[in-house]
Amino acid sequence: MDDLTPVHLRDGTEAFVVPLLPANREAFRQEFEHLSAETRFDRFLAVVPRLTDTMLDHLVDEVDGADHVALVLLVITEDGTELPLGLARIIRYPDDPTAADVAVTVVDDWHGRGVATALLEVLMQHRPKGVERIVTVINASNHASLAMLRRLGEVEVSQPESGVQFVVIDLPGSADSTPPERGPVDTSIHTGRGTSLRRLDPPEPPASRAPTT
Ligand SMILES: CC(C)(COP(=O)(O)OP(=O)(O)OC[C@H]1O[C@@H](n2cnc3c(N)ncnc32)[C@H](O)[C@@H]1OP(=O)(O)O)[C@@H](O)C(=O)NCCC(=O)NCCS
């Protein structure tokens, strides 16, 4: 993807979507701690007060731009500071190359303003090749998350246990139905931009959750 994709939020605010870079690791760790406990819980379906090094390895260093894509939406303030507002990632399931998990986190003050909608639109354009289906788990009371996911395609929801919902979405118009051959990792997502992004978003899923996030 281009290093910087311009987008507009619901109220017309100009924003940009950029790849998450290894250089963002420390800022990402700090930003996560500024999220509300509710937002952190909804993201991980668990109490996660802070990100450990192991989580950061997965959430930042393992982003490869091929099977694991992570994008940040930011606005640029009047004094030129890059202000990250949300992060979205998609991770292919190792045992089913046509399916992937999706996770999104938006900073609390910007909820309901179209950050997730804008991020997901760009994320879907850059999803791992061959992914035709999103399979994920959300908090059953997380209406915003379900609404956000419904924009992606036809949604099937099941609730095998109280408190959570399993969501499967068939993505329309799969860009490339052929899963990539396993080979050298495409590292292009890590090149080119060296900003000091503050950041949001987090760790490995609890064992009960689907693979990624
Ligand atoms: C879920 C989350 C990512 C949504 O981000 P957002 O930027 O607020 O979402 P948007 O403004 O783009 O809105 C997306 C949809 O959710 C709806 N929505 C937003 N907030 C809502 C709320 N509080 N209740 C119900 N629906 C809501 C919007 O109306 C929109 O639906 P529409 O397209 O049918 O109008 C954000 O609330 C968040 O970070 N929550 C905590 C982490 C989380 O739950 N992540 C998802 C699971 S990984």
Image: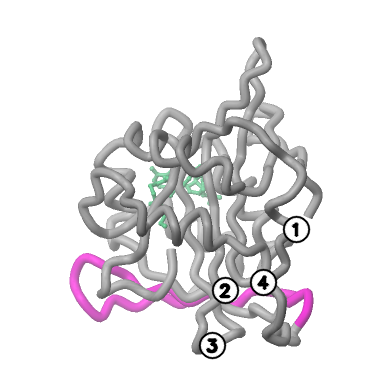
Q: What range of the chain is rendered magenta?
A: 156-176
SS of the residue under disc 3: strand
The tag earlier along the polypeptide, 1 or 4, is 4
SS of the residue under disc 2: strand
Q: Which residue is mark 1?
A: 188
Q: Which residue is mark 3?
A: 96
The tag earlier along the polypeptide, 3 or 2, is 3
The amino acid type of the residue labelled 2 equals Glu
The tag earlier along the polypeptide, 1 or 2, is 2
The amino acid type of the residue labelled 3 equals Asp
Q: Is residue 32 left or right of residue 116?
A: left
Q: Position of residue 108 (x, y in %)?
A: 39, 34
The tag earlier along the polypeptide, 3 or 1, is 3
Callout 4–callout 2 Cβ contact below 8 Å: no
Frontmost of labels 3 and 1 is: 1
Frontmost of labels 4 and 2 is: 4
- Residue at left 54%, top 41%? 24
